[in-house]
């Protein structure tokens, strides 16, 4: 996807409120169930907001505005506003979610309710960049359903180079170091 004329490409579906928090720089990591993200993720991908299965009770009180801001699917199309790359990946137990709570918008119990509390979880530290121009994408049947990864259609152009990191290098390095301290 480094070619600006490239079409299509990978996109990660995530709840719209979480995508908004990632684009704002409030959240820098994703907690995922390992079976949702099989294999290795290499290279940039679009963040595709999903509007189904959102639950305001999963959000920390100070972040519930992300749910309210992103609770309704826009009629004009799905807004793709950002791209991301996985910088680091960790495996944790659900017991470790409390120590990470200040780095994501859900409550630890909200994540436990979303995933099986007895399973190991995958933590992805993301470098998120906002696109210079967001894209409104038609929601196609191939994008629907409970799947984490989708392949955007050939007529959808998302250029990761036409983006700006949501956190400057120094702020991202501080956040990365703080998360490493919790996880290592």
Image (cartoon, rainbow, N blue to C red):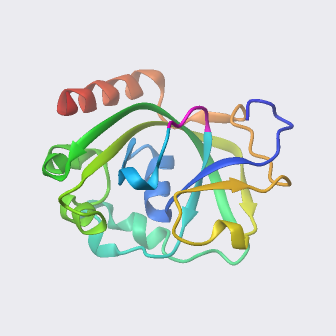
Position of 75 with respect to 110 (left or right) is right
Point out residue 39 in the picture as x, y percentages from the top left corner: 49, 41
* Residue under the point 15% across and 44% down: 99
Can see residue 77?
A: no
Q: Is residue 153 above or below residue 178?
A: below
| Residue 42 shown in magenta | yes
Numbered-mark total = 0
Point out residue 32 in the picture as x, y percentages from the top left corner: 37, 52
In the picture, which quadrant includes the C terminus?
top left
Q: Is residue 27 above or below residue 165?
A: below
* Residue under the point 73% across and 70% down: 140
| Residue 105 shown in magenta | no
**Closer-to-camera residue (132/38):** 38
* Residue under the point 74% across and 39% down: 159
**Closer-to-camera residue (10/129):** 10
Q: Which residues are magenta?
A: 40-44
* Residue under the point 77% across and 49% down: 8
Can see residue 15?
A: yes
In the picture, which quadrant includes the N terminus?
top right
Point out residue 164 in the picture as x, y percentages from the top left corner: 61, 34
**Closer-to-camera residue (40/107):** 40
Position of 7 with respect to 160 (left or right) is right
**Closer-to-camera residue (150/99):** 150
Point out residue 119 in the picture as x, y percentages from the top left corner: 23, 55
Position of 107 with respect to 88 (left or right) is left
Type of secondary structure dominating the magenta stretch: loop
């Amino acid at each position: 996807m480094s070619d600006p004329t490239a079409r299509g490409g990978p996109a990660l579906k995530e709840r719209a409120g979480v995508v908004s928090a990632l684009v704002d720089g409030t959240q820098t990591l994703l907690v995922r169930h390992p079976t949702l993200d099989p294999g290795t993720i290499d290279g940039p991908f679009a963040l595709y907001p999903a509007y189904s299965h959102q639950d305001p009770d999963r959000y920390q009180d100070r972040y519930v505005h992300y749910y309210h801001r992103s609770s309704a699917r826009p009629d004009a199309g799905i807004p793709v506003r950002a791209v991301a790359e996985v910088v680091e990946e960790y495996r944790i137990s659900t017991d470790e979610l409390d120590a990470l709570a200040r780095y994501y918008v859900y409550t630890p119990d909200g994540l436990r309710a979303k995933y099986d509390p007895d399973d190991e979880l995958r933590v992805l530290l993301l470098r998120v960049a906002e696109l210079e121009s967001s894209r409104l994408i038609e929601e196609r049947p191939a994008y629907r359903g409970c799947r984490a990864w989708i392949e955007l259609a050939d007529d959808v152009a998302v250029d990761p180079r036409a983006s700006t990191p949501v956190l400057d290098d120094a702020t991202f390095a501080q956040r990365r170091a703080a998360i490493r301290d919790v996880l290592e």
